[in-house]
């Protein structure tokens, strides 16, 4: 999976490993990849991990070649999670976005995802179907991809791309028994969403990953979390112009909240606490795995 070292990607990595899958983790930070891989192997006896440090924003021909070699060498690649995605730190007007922000989002959310999917298709098709009769490619879309959000125009458009891309491919891949599924999420706890605590409407990344995997097979577009699904059903009953105006208003309110210095301080403190807790838990898992090995 891409974008594996945090948020939803990390949730998928953990849950897939719990369910007996070896995992191949791709992200930019090598140290974070190594820590996650160690944690997964320590928690899940017999599970193997591989890592690849890659910046998906500027992947070169040589990077795609490396990806191809490494993924082709895996035995029975059967689940691919197109998870990596960029957004701006705060909702913003198009003309206030930097060139780097626009390029980053288009490159990672659309270009890399497309080329990566093209690269994995022949590998998925070559899997041993007696071991993995079905395969799946998941594409992380978003509410903003299906209900366009002002102040997030570029992000919205790239997530609409992910939705259409995933669903269109599904028809092409039916005869290869590969499900290509657009995963539509509202907020999930992660750095990108800014939510650091779960609630009824904001699941943790692992809860989101579990529900998503449990519901695969239910079509080429999935809104895995029950609360998100309910919201989407209600929104679909409303006039789209009303929804667009309301969404824009919510984005303006979100921007005000994100730029509020007091809230920023509180959020930074909570994030620091959460990271310290995560490091402590990881150290405990590794210590207990090492103790088991030495007995
Ligand atoms: N969280 C939500 O509420 C939500 C809602 C709807 C859709 N989504 C979608 O779900 C996906 C995951 O979101 P998230 O909230 O989990 O994001 P996140 O918390 O920002 O995590 C992103 C992950 O991607 C990696 N990454 C970022 N830029 C990269 C790059 N250029 N090359 C390689 N790896 C990169 C990061 O690790 P490194 O820093 O180590 O590279 C990190 O592991 C995205 O596609 C997002 O659009 C999220």
Image (cartoon, grey):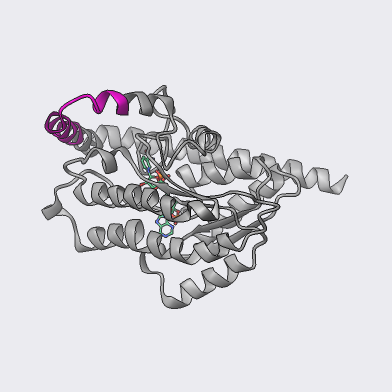
Task: Say if the magenta span includes residue 290.
Answer: no
Residue sitting at the far right: 295
Quadrant (top left/top right/bottom left/bottom right) for the C terminus: top right
Foreground of the two, 55 or 258? 55
Q: Is residue 53 visible?
A: no
Write the residue at 56% across / 59% down: 124
Residue 281 place in picture, x, y as percent: 61, 38
Horizontal arrangement in the rendering, residue 260 relative to residue 213 (left or right) = left
Magenta segment main secondary structure: helix
Residue sitting at the far front: 175
Magenta stretch bounds: 232-251
Write the residue at 53% across / 66% down: 122
Foreground of the two, 131 or 66? 131
Q: Is residue 105 visible?
A: yes
Task: Say if the magenta span includes residue 247.
Answer: yes
Residue 72 place in picture, x, y as percent: 60, 68
Foreground of the two, 115 or 209? 115
């Amino acid at each position: 999976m891409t974008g594996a070292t945090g948020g939803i990607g990390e949730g998928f990595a953990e849950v897939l490993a719990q369910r007996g899958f070896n995992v191949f983790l791709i992200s930019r930070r090598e140290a974070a990849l190594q820590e996650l891989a160690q944690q997964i192997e320590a928690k899940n006896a017999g599970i193997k991990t591989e890592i690849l440090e890659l910046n998906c924003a500027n992947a070169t021909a040589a990077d795609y070649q490396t990806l191809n070699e490494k993924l082709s060498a895996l035995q029975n690649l059967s689940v691919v999670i197109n998870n990596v995605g960029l957004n701006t730190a705060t909702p913003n007007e198009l003309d206030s976005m930097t060139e780097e922000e626009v390029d980053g989002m288009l490159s990672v959310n659309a270009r890399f995802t497309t080329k990566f999917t093209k690269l994995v298709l022949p590998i998925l098709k070559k899997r041993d179907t007696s071991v993995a009769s079905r395969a799946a490619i998941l594409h992380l879309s978003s509410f903003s991809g299906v209900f366009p959000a002002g102040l997030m125009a570029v992000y919205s458009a790239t997530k609409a791309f992910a939705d259409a891309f995933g669903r269109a491919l599904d028809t092409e891949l039916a005869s290869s028994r590969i499900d290509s599924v657009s995963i539509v999420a509202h907020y999930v706890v992660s750095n990108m969403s800014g939510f650091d605590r779960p609630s009824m409407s904001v699941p943790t990344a692992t809860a989101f990953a579990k529900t998503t995997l449990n519901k695969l097979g239910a079509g080429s577009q999935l809104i895995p979390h029950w609360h998100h699904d309910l919201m989407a059903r209600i929104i679909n009953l409303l006039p789209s112009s009303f929804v667009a105006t309301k969404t824009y208003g919510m984005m303006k309110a979100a921007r005000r909240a994100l730029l509020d210095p007091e809230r920023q301080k509180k959020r930074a403190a909570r994030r620091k606490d959460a990271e310290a807790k995560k490091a402590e838990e990881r150290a405990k898992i590794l210590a207990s795995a090492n103790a088991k090995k030495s007995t």
